[in-house]
Image (cartoon, rainbow, N blue to C red):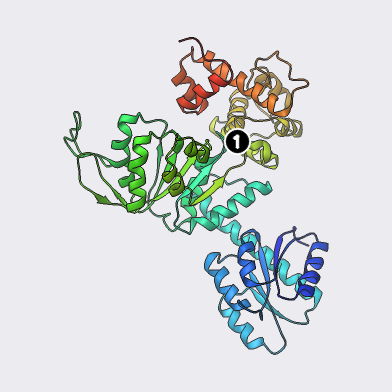
Amino acid sequence: MIDPGTILVVDDEPAVRFTLTELFSDRGHRVLAAGSGVEALELFDDAEVVLSDLHMPAMDGLALLAEITARDPSLPVVLLTAHGSERVAVQALKAGAYDYLSKPFDIDELTVTIERALEARRLRVASRRSAVERVIGRPVIAHSPQMRRLLSAVERIATRDVTVLVRGETGTGKELIGQLIHAHSARVARPMVRFNCAAIPAELAESELFGHVKGAFTGATAAKRGFFAQAEGGTLILDEIGEMPLNIQATLLRALQDGEIQPVGGGLERVDVRIVATTNRDLAADAKAGRFREDLYYRLAVVELVVPPLRERRKDIPALAVEFARRYGEKFGLGPLELEPELRDALIAEPWPGNVRQLENAIARLAALAVSGPLGLADYSDRIGAGGDTSTGADDSASTEGLSLREQVEAFERGVVARALAEQGGNQSATARALGLSRASLIDKLKKYGLLGPR
């Protein structure tokens, strides 16, 4: 038997739905049940294979097949047909159905057919992800259910040319999700351009985004193409969109609404660009508080994806650590480095408030200090734990015994920020860059943890 999967059963007869649900649940599969084609369209996003009756009122199996194939051609659909409907079933195969079975069905034959369909789905997904990994130049790791669901959603929406807002904590991999959306889309052969909204001063943001003509302002000795023009036909990733100045937000909104930009000092230009915006802030709350334009938020969040923090997807930690060890081992001329089981267990137990970025930095430091052989728990304790990179207190000697998980995470984060600030001699801009934060986000954390010195 193959690994359990998610099967969507569609039949207007409750007894048949019950029987099929019990049959596949007993074999370890997750089963979703729908009493009509319309109801099935609300559920199929979570399915790996669809098993549908052919004859149903309102929307029959053929109509459902057409809708699913249009939205997700890689999702297998198996049809159950009444005796004498074989001719129609053959038409369904030509229309894209994976297979068909006649009622009354043989349980063993049905089980084998569905499990073959599950395997076919996974092979298609793996093949597509392999092609995507070649485009983005790195493996996509998703062993946890949370990340598997997220990547499934990414694959679906990538082909639908809508604006996407990707939300998540710092270091979770929001930019990677933006890259995956581009790589899965029909725009993959066109440019993918990244604009960091937090890294550009407000007075330069408009020129950087939309460009300028020669002589538009003092120092504009030549015309410049902005990021929108550079991404023509492709995807523009707006990193940390929550840091964008309000006056530029209004200009961006017009560009999204009308498909037109106006370079500084120039006239209107048509653009064809897909926008993927990322943020570590709650933009809905910011919009209500007046810190972000509400109309722009709704324009950006046509589809909103949330990247879970690493502490909520611990099944991904071992594979991520192995990949980082391979990458940095080769980078430092050591060859692929292995991790001892005790070290993997220790990594899984860490809270990782800095998420994937912090895990990568920890493995990079281990690799940089490694001499030879596999990396073990002693290396981690001596070189990382003692260095404060993964301690759970405000300082190395601080105890977290008796604290809640949230309090331990906050204590750890305070220690990381305090040490980074000290290492940068109190320079906030340098500290923000070292931590991968915007300066505004860093100041918020300094205020939160009482680290903001007197002015």
Instruction: Please state if 345 lies on the left or on the right of 412 as rendered.
Output: right
Instruction: Please state if 99 lies on the left or on the right of 417 as rendered.
Output: right
Instruction: Please state if 318 lies on the left or on the right of 157 as rendered.
Output: right
Q: Which residue is mark 1?
A: 324
Q: Residue at x 61, y 75 (%)?
A: 97
Q: Is residue 113 above or below residue 186?
A: below
Query: What's the residue type where badge 1 is placed?
Result: Phe
Residue 369, percent from left and from top: 61, 22
The part of the image, by quadrant, that contains residue 358 is top right
Q: Is residue 430 above or below residue 21?
A: above
Which of these two is toward me, 246 or 424?
Answer: 246
Quadrant, the C terminus: top left
The part of the image, by quadrant, that contains residue 341 is top right
Q: Is residue 355 above or below residue 57?
A: above
Residue 225 showing in the rendered view: yes
Residue 39, percent from left and from top: 64, 67
What is the count of numbered marks?
Answer: 1
Q: Residue at x 65, y 47 (%)?
A: 146
The part of the image, by quadrant, that contains residue 214 is top left
SS type, badge 1: helix
Which of these two is toward me, 15 or 195?
Answer: 15
Residue 231 showing in the rendered view: no
Residue 4, percent from left and from top: 75, 58
Residue found at the far left of this picture: 215
Classify mark 1: residues with Cα within 10 Å, few (<14), some (14-19) or many (20+): many
Which of these two is toward me, 440 or 104?
Answer: 440
